[in-house]
Image (cartoon, rainbow, N blue to C red):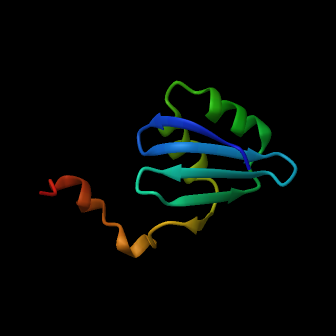
Amino acid sequence: MEMKRINSGKLRAIGYDASHRILQVQLDDGSTLQYSGVGEESWRRLSASGAAWSFYRDNIEEEFAAKRVSGKPAAAVSCLDDLFVKL
């Protein structure tokens, strides 16, 4: 799947397989997630959005189940990690 580089919120790359309706996103922690059943209209709106992170959170993350295909397991990532400076 061809990935499009993006720098919006925690998104770093996005890609879409139209024949299988799979959206793939890469996050800033290096993890890659796949969402099945995503329509071309959602892909088009995400890839053209000036606020891709917000669109992703509101329309993809909340509407479709994610399958982690690479990166850290969800339990290894804490929402509190962003609050602390690593020295």
Residue 54 appears in the rendering:
no
Could you tell whether 24 is left or right of 8 in the image?
A: right
Question: In this picture, is 73 found above or below 15?
Answer: below
The residue positioned 25% from the left and 54% from the top of the image is 82
The part of the image, by quadrant, that contains residue 72 is bottom left
For the view shown, which residue lies furthest in the left direction?
Answer: 87
Question: In this picture, is 59 found above or below 78?
Answer: above
**Of the pair 2 and 73, the residue shown nearer to us:** 2
Could you tell whether 25 is left or right of 2 in the image?
A: left
Could you tell whether 15 is left or right of 80 in the image?
A: right
**Of the pair 68 and 71, the residue shown nearer to us:** 71
The residue positioned 35% from the left and 67% from the top of the image is 77
Q: Give percent across and percent down for residue 20.
A: 84, 55
Residue 70 appears in the rendering:
yes
Q: Which quadrant is the C terminus positioned in?
A: bottom left
Q: Give percent across and percent down for residue 68.
A: 58, 67
Question: In this picture, is 55 found above or below 72?
Answer: above
Total residue callouts = 0
The residue positioned 30% from the left and 60% from the top of the image is 79
The residue positioned 54% from the left and 51% from the top of the image is 26
Q: Give percent across and percent down for residue 28.
A: 42, 50
Could you tell whether 41 is left or right of 72 in the image?
A: right
Q: Give percent across and percent down for residue 38.
A: 74, 49
**Of the pair 29 and 49, the residue shown nearer to us:** 29
Question: In this picture, is 63 found above or below 11?
Answer: below
